Amino acid sequence: MMIELTNIEDTRKPVIGQILEELERKRKEAASSGNEEFANNCWRESEALKVNILYIEAFEKIKSKKYRDAWNDLERCEIDAASIERNSDSDYYTKSRCHFIEKQVSKWQSLYPYCVFASPGFKVGYYTCSICNHKVRPRSRCSHVKGKIYNGELCVHVAHDMEFLELSIVTKPVQKYSVMHDDETLDFSLINYLSDFLDNAFENWEAHWTRKSFPIERFSQVTPDSDCPCKSGKKFEECCINEKEISIPHVDFQFFKEISDDKAKVRFPY
Ligand SMILES: [Zn+2]
Ligand SMILES: [Zn+2]
């Protein structure tokens, strides 16, 4: 069974809810009668459908400028698609569009201005296997592998006796939802610009990062104490203020459809 969803209206059709319920019913039934392969198939179908829905929802949120909510959905897509990849062959992963979603999610994430995250540190007393409840210790493991599905259920290690240790500020977080920025202060124009061109979540696009040099006169509005346009992180007055040209990060978007000329005009940020 393969359901092709394109836009948010598709995801809200009652039939989608019915399909998910049906898959869940069949998964439980197969699991209790010991039909592991069928139970795993139901899990896979259901998860892939949910990732498709979530990705479409994330795209909708980007379109309506709810960037933080979209960011959280994109991370969820990333995690869930990885789960599906671990538990299916590459043919299924492609066919269910999860591979496409995985690639798009990482491209969207690369356009976000977020760079500082909170990372909580915990001390964990012990873990148990979610499939058999075995207490996982270095020399005593059960036969289940974390991240694999067994009888239609994903194996996770459940943490017990957790103790909060610290909160670190990091740039490459394990979990991406703990963004430390206030969105009001950030520039989402790149994402906004791109999403204007796209009609649905499944249109392909590429972003090519380069640098482009512009004469210093173009930056006449930049005050000496603001951030340097070259994105070095230094103040303008301590960086490129006396240069003839400034080289700024530049992204070329590539679309796989016709774009009208006036729409495709390069926008210069200064
Ligand atoms: Zn186990
Ligand atoms: Zn500079």
Image (tube, helix red, strand yellow):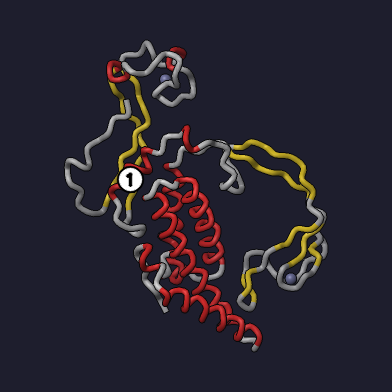
In this orientation, does residue 114 appear? yes
Give the vertical position of 152 relative to 173 (above or below): below
| Apparent side of residue 167 relative to residue 86 in the rendered image (left or right) | right
Q: Nearer the viewer, residue 114 or 13?
A: 13
Image point (42%, 13%), residue name: 224
Label 1's element?
A: helix
Task: Please identify the quadrant where the N terminus is shown.
Answer: bottom left
In this rendering, position of residue 248 left or right of residue 45: left
Please determine whether, in this image, residue 59 is positioned above or below residue 47. Answer: above
Question: Which residue is at the front of the view, 147 or 112?
Answer: 112
Horizontal and vertical percent for residue 152?
A: 61, 76
Horizontal arrangement in the rendering, residue 251 relative to residue 179 (left or right): left
* Viewport quadrant of the C terminus: top left
84 or 190, nearer to the observer = 190
Q: The disc labelled 1 sits on which kind of residue? A: Leu
Residue sitting at 63 percent across and 83 percent down? 31
Determine which residue is flagged by label 1.
194
Locate residue 246, reporting x and y percent.
34, 21
Most extreme residue toward the top, as rendered? 242
Q: Residue at x 71, y 62 (%)?
A: 157
Q: Is residue 112 left or right of residue 213?
A: right
Q: Quadrant of ligand 2?
A: top left
- The vertical placement of 199 against 141, above or below, is above
Q: Could you say where residue 178 lies in the image, as x and y percent from the top left?
A: 59, 44
